[in-house]
Image (cartoon, rainbow, N blue to C red):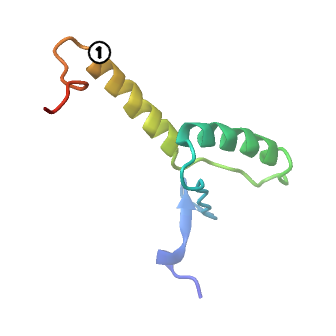
Amino acid sequence: MLTATSLFRYNGEAAIGLTIGMKAGANLLQFGDALKTEMSRIVTDLPIGVDVNLVSDQPLVVDHAYQVSRVLCSRPSSSCWRSAS
């Protein structure tokens, strides 16, 4: 029996949650790009009324963090690339 705590909801509607993970050692940004391409293909074959919504985009989070660190570490006062010794 389903209870309120066992339901997954998206924008207030009952939904099915699916987690997709990559294999160990893979490149997260390449994985994200490949997943977006594959999901675009899959969505075209879904029946009317079935939607796919991205809830979390870890590759986007990682890319953003990388871009921010590049900006911060490019500053002359940055100690990002200085050795600890």
* Quadrant location, the C terminus: top left
23 and 39: which one is in front? Answer: 23
Residue lying at the far top in this picture: please name it.
76
Residue tagged by mark 1? Answer: 74
Picture residue at 85% right of the left edge, 54% below the top: 47
Q: Position of residue 25 (x, y in %)?
A: 54, 50
Please, is residue 3 above or below residue 63 in the view?
below
Q: Which class describes the residues within 10 Å of circle 1: few (<14), some (14-19), or many (20+)?
A: few
State left or right for residue 55 relative to residue 53: left
Please, is residue 34 above or below residue 70 in the view?
below
29 and 45: which one is in front? Answer: 29
User: Which residue type does callout 1 highlight?
Assistant: Ser
Please, is residue 72 above or below residue 57 in the view?
above
Picture residue at 54% right of the left edge, 53% below the top: 11
Q: Position of residue 53 (x, y in %)?
A: 63, 48
Q: Position of residue 12 (x, y in %)?
A: 54, 58
Labels in figure, total: 1
Picture residue at 34% right of the left edge, 26% below the top: 68
Residue lying at the far front in this picture: please name it.
85
Q: Position of residue 72 (x, y in %)?
A: 27, 21
The quarter of the picture where residue 65 lies is: top left
Please, is residue 60 above or below residue 19 in the view?
above
58 and 75: which one is in front? Answer: 75
State left or right for residue 77 relative to residue 6: left
Q: Secondary structure at mark 1?
A: loop
